[in-house]
Amino acid sequence: MAIQVTKLSAGIGAEIGGVDLTKPISDADFAAIEKAWQDHVILLFRGQKLTHEQHVAFSRRFGELDDHRTIPKFRDPDFHEILPVVNAVIDGRKQPVGRQWHSDLSTTLRPARGSLLRCEVIPPVGGDTMFANMYLAYETLSDKMKELLDGLWGIQDMTVARHSRGRDLSDVRKRNPPVAQPVVRVHPETGRKALFVAEMTTTGIVGMKDEEAQPILEYLFRHSVQPEFTYRHRWQPDDMIAWDNRCAMHLALDDYDINIPRRLYRTTLLGEPLGYIVADEEMAQAA
């Protein structure tokens, strides 16, 4: 059976049919999948009852995988390429993860190229994930706004997403200092421009005072997640979604009973080197 591609929404996403990821995939079928990924940013595969080994094998067809060595306590002990995405226990309380719009590993010097997330257990109500098309977010800006943004660098800080937890994050910040990433990112394969800012991690703009940068960032955060750019996925067990982090953001909705298990598994495609560590004087200038 030939690969079938069915759009999920007007702005982003397609469902891929006619493929069984538990079996070897021909080069021709995989080329069709890659083409659909470039065209639609996120891909949904339903009814894929995969083992960790099969999940890793399919993900590796797209490129080199992260072994999550920087977070060894959270990766699967037997399959280091697998990162369980579960209700986290922090300070004795269960906490959902990914509750704000973000792009995986944007706070590092090698932001993720892509992610493949497989669902095993989902609450009977809620636990959805939303995705936003950052190509469209950029392309629908005015020409004057594009002129302003092209060439700007956003400050990405891993610790800001954790401030609400009331923990001392000085060691985390020392090991993972803020990095600068382009506000407008050019996709290395398609050549299209995409916004590369996210409410969870982008705290400022290099060379701007905070009071100058924040109105711009707040506008971009709101603009990026308009309904026409987004897709809301209601998970089913054995779903897998692949998304391109270079042109998409995602958000795990906090709309379910946190005491009910929600268990998914993610592989992460290593991305191209990008950005630079923000110097102390640049951070001071942005304050």
Image (spheres, rainbow, N blue to C red):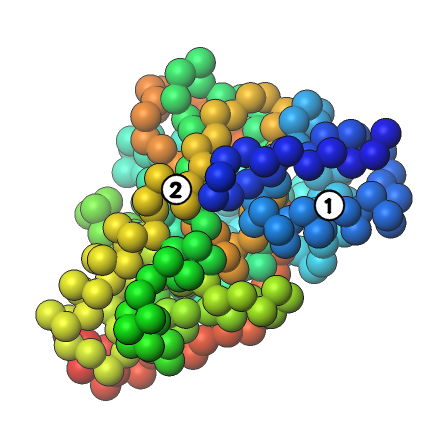
Residue at image position (68%, 23%) is 47
User: How many residues crowd around disc 2 within 10 Å: few (fewer than 14), some, or many (20 or more)?
Assistant: some
Vertical comparison of 54 with 278: above or below: above
Label number found at residue 239: none
Among numbered discs 1 and 2, the one appearing first in the sequence: 1
In the rendered structure, which amino acid carries the disc numbered 2? Glu
**Which x, y percent locates residue 85?**
49, 37
Say which element carries label 1.
helix
Say which element carries label 2.
helix
Q: Is residue 105 left or right of residue 75?
A: left
Residue at image position (40%, 16%) is 125
In the rendered structure, which amino acid carries the disc numbered 1? Ile
In front: 115, or 18? 18
Residue of label 1 = 33
In front: 77, or 96? 96
Q: Quadrant of the N terminus?
A: top right
Answer whether residue 98 is visible to the viewer in this image: no
Residue lying farthest to the bottom in this orientation: 281
Q: Is residue 261 left or right of residue 13?
A: left
Q: Quadrant of residue 108?
A: bottom left
**Which x, y percent locates residue 256?**
34, 22
**Which x, y percent locates residue 9?**
50, 35
Residue at image position (40%, 61%) is 138
Residue at image position (45%, 37%) is 231
* Number of numbered discs: 2
Q: Quadrant of residue 174?
A: bottom left
Q: Quadrant of the C terminus?
A: bottom left
Residue of label 2 = 228
**CA separation, marks 1 and 2?**
24 Å
Answer whether residue 132 is visible to the viewer in this image: yes
**Which x, y percent locates residue 259?**
35, 20
